[in-house]
Amino acid sequence: AAAAGRRDAALASLAAAERASADPVFLRRLAAAYRDAGDSRAAGRVRRRAGDDAGLLLDRAEAAAAAGDRRGAAALLSRAASLGLDDDEARRVVLLRQSQGDYAGAAEVARARIVLRPVDARWRNDLGVLHSLMGRDDEAAADWAAAIALDPDGLAPYLSLGTLYSSAGRRRDALELYEKSLSRRHVPSEAGVLRRILEERRKLLP
C-alpha cells in the first residue's frame, strides 16, 4: 500500500509538471520519467506532444521485446536507429540489441557514436563489451585500453580489461591494472564496480 501511494504521488507530480511546460526537451525527460514509473500510456502521450518519434519507437521496441516479439522489436529498433538519436536514445538501442543477442547491430550503433563523440570513454567501453560478447578479445582489449586513456578515472574498463587479462593467464598485468585503478579518483556511482575490482584484486594477491 505504501509503495502504491508513493507511485500515485509520483504520477501526480509528473502530471503537474506536464501541465506546466511545453518545452520539447523537458517533455522528453518527462516521458522517460513516466516510463520509469510504469505509465507507458502517459509516456506515449508526452512523447507525441514533444514530437519524439524515436522515443515512441524505442518504447514500442522495448514492449515488443518484453512480449517475446524479437522480429517486431528488431524492426522497430531499425526504424529508431535511422533517426537522429541523442546519446541516451542510442544507448537504449545498444542495450536492446544486446539483450536480443544482436551484438553486431549494437556494435554498429556504438561505432557511430564514437565517430560523433570520439572523446567519450563510455562508448569505447560499451564497444569493448560488445566485442567481448562476440569473442573478439583483442579488439575488446584495445577498446578498454582506449577508454582508460580517454577517462583514467572511469572504473568499468579497468574491471573488464583486468578480468580479460586474468582469464588469459596474465595475472601480473591484471594486478597492475587493478592497482592503477585504485590510485584514481572514485565517484559514489561506481561503488559497485570498485567492490568488484577489490574482490578480483584479492584473488590475484599471493
Image: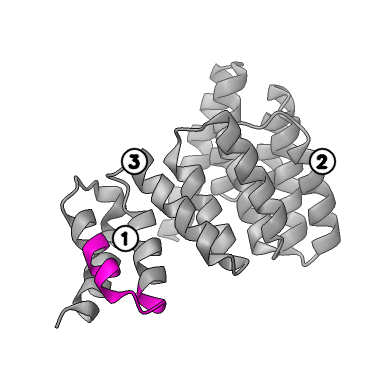
Classify mark 3: residues with Cα within 10 Å, few (<14), some (14-19) or many (20+). Answer: some
Which residue has dot 1 on it? 193
Question: Disc 1 residue type?
Answer: Val
The quadrant where residue 25 appears: top right
Q: Position of residue 203 (x, y in %)?
A: 23, 80
Left or right, residue 132 beside residue 41 = left
Q: Main secondary structure of the magenta part?
A: helix
The residue located at (41%, 58%) in the rendering is 2
- Residue 31 sits inside the magenta stretch: no
Is 29 left, or right, of 145 in this rendering? right
Question: Against 115, is 191 above or below?
Answer: below
Image quadrant containing the C terminus: bottom left
In this rendering, position of residue 1 left or right of residue 71: left
Tell me which label, 1 or 3, sits earlier in the chain.
Answer: 3
Classify residue 136 by image quadrant. bottom right
The amino acid beneath tag 3 is Asp
Asked whether, in this view, residue 27 is left or right of residue 47, the answer is left
Query: Residue 153 at what x, y percent from top left?
Result: 27, 44
At x 76%, y 39%, the residue is 80
The one nearer the camera, 79 or 168, is: 168
Reading the image, the residue beneath label 3 is 151
